[in-house]
Image: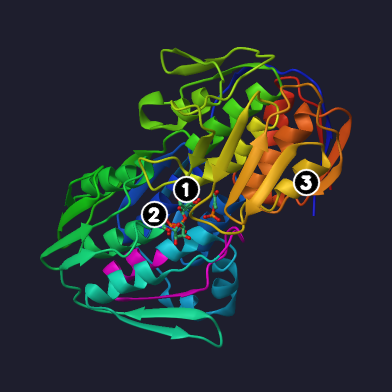
Amino acid sequence: MSSFRVKGGLKLKGEITPQGAKNEALQILCAVLLTEETIQIHKIPNIRDVNKLIELLMDMGVAVSKTGPESYEFNAAKVDLDYLDTDKFLTKASSLRGSVMLLGPLLARYGKGKISKPGGDKIGRRRLDTHFVGFQKLGAKFNYDTKREIYNIDGHDLKGTYMLLDEASVTGTANILMAAVMAEGKTTIYNAACEPYLQQLCDMLNRMGAKITGVGSNLLHVEGVKKLNGTEHTLLPDMIEIGSFIGLAAMTQSEITIKDAQIHRLGIIPDTFKRMGIKMEFRGDDIHIPAQKHYEIETFIDGSILTVADAIWPGFTPDLLSIVLVTATQAKGTVLVHQKMFESRLFFVDKLIDMGAQIILCDPHRATVIGLDRKYPLKGIRMTSPDIRAGVSLLIAALSAEGQSIIDNVEQIDRGYQYIDQRLNALGADIVRID
Ligand SMILES: CC(=O)N[C@H]1[C@@H](OP(=O)(O)OP(=O)(O)OC[C@H]2O[C@@H](n3ccc(=O)[nH]c3=O)[C@H](O)[C@@H]2O)O[C@H](CO)[C@@H](O)[C@@H]1O
Ligand SMILES: C=C(OP(=O)(O)O)C(=O)O
């Protein structure tokens, strides 16, 4: 396991370009299985989860070639279905969340699929019912091997149908959609998730010949087609990275310009950080954050304490709540952070408390942060990164702290942030990777 040794208290300055979006990449990579024709994808980030999924596709027989620094070509003309039965596949697939989205395309193209319980962050219960109920509605049979923790689906001749999802699951919607594009007849998916990443997936599938309407809404209509073609696709900038950089700039009093942020696709993210008192200027498609000694958290109109809560898109993404929380520790004012979706994602606050932050963990879902307004800096300590976003929040805390911090288990951070140490060091940070 690797660690970061971080020297705190340095102000950073300069430009940073966000990587291609991790969570979009995972959907788009699974979609290459839907056609025997070649698919080109650009802006693929060099991060652990994405690399593992690419490896998994290669092991399945997909021809993969790197055509540029961040571009790849995929051809799934030949897929070795027997490989799905091997322990090697099942073990590898279980190491990342995104692998579950291999099932939809496999079902659509080959009438069957198999996957072990997918991994991802241990941030509370992460059920998959929505995925499998959706497949069943399309006519597939589902069976869960409780002993080996393997999900099996079987279903030739899928038939379009109406379905109302029990929750607007992001990966669930992507999975069902990919299964439905080649089902016979019309499928209607109501209460669909509609994140920009899902919109991107729909646009890509339509370019491949699928017939999906309602893109961007929670009501998707899919007219089944017999076959899909190849296409070219470019990933969006990672909105979670963008939000992380905004929080980082505020906490470390740094002047940072986030390049080519595709601001119109960021939804409520910039406004949420503005409510934390963080100034930012949109310069074309760049976000410029000036160095700020003080930033003051707004209250609600009636003077009561601001709450920042997650919600399904177009609400605020749960993946940025840890960043909001850490950013609040040096703001002026108080905020209640309410993590509604996941039940174990706020426990990392004990490390921030050890560093000197004033936080009350009210219950597993809610934490109140009383900002220090820089009267006392956080103090560097040794800590472990429990999940990807808590990991980056701890890195931000360490960069703003007085003295040196060690962050262990940075593999969690590497799961989703490409070359983060090198990119931040280029702005003036002092992060050393210790293997
Ligand atoms: C690989 C990937 O893309 N992972 C993302 C994806 O995970 P993933 O697709 O696994 O998450 P889901 O959207 O299925 O659900 C997230 C959590 O929210 C709950 N829930 C969801 C919808 C709803 O209407 N009500 C509700 O309570 C679920 O029970 C679950 O606990 O979406 C999550 C929610 O944005 C993000 O945190 C993850 O980073
Ligand atoms: C929770 C996340 O990822 P995963 O769904 O892959 O665990 C995340 O990206 O914040």
Disc 2 residue: CB within 8 Å of ligand 1 = yes
Q: Quadrant of residue 329?
A: top right
- Nearest to the eye among marks 2 and 1: give it: 2
Q: Residue at (63%, 26%) from the top-left corner?
A: 333
Question: At 61% from the left edge and 57% from the top edge, which residue is drawn?
Answer: 364
Give the residue number, with chain letter if any, for mark 1: 23
In the rendered structure, which amino acid carries the disc numbered 3? Lys
Percent x, y of residue 5: 85, 38
Residue 161 lies in quadrant: bottom left
Label 2, label 1: how many angstroms apart (C-alpha)?
9 Å
**Mark 1 sits near ligand 1, with its Cβ under 8 Å away:** yes
Residue 112 within the magenta-colored segment of the rendering: yes
Say what secondary structure mark 2 lies in: helix
Q: Is residue 155 above or below residue 250?
A: below
Q: Which residue is mark 2?
A: 170
Residue 407: % across, % down: 80, 44
- Please name the residue that numbered disc 3 is placed on: 351
Residue 401 magenta-highlighted: no
Depth order, front residue of 236/63: 236
The residue located at (52%, 73%) in the rendering is 117
Q: Residues within 10 Å of mark 3 (few under 14, many from 20)?
A: some
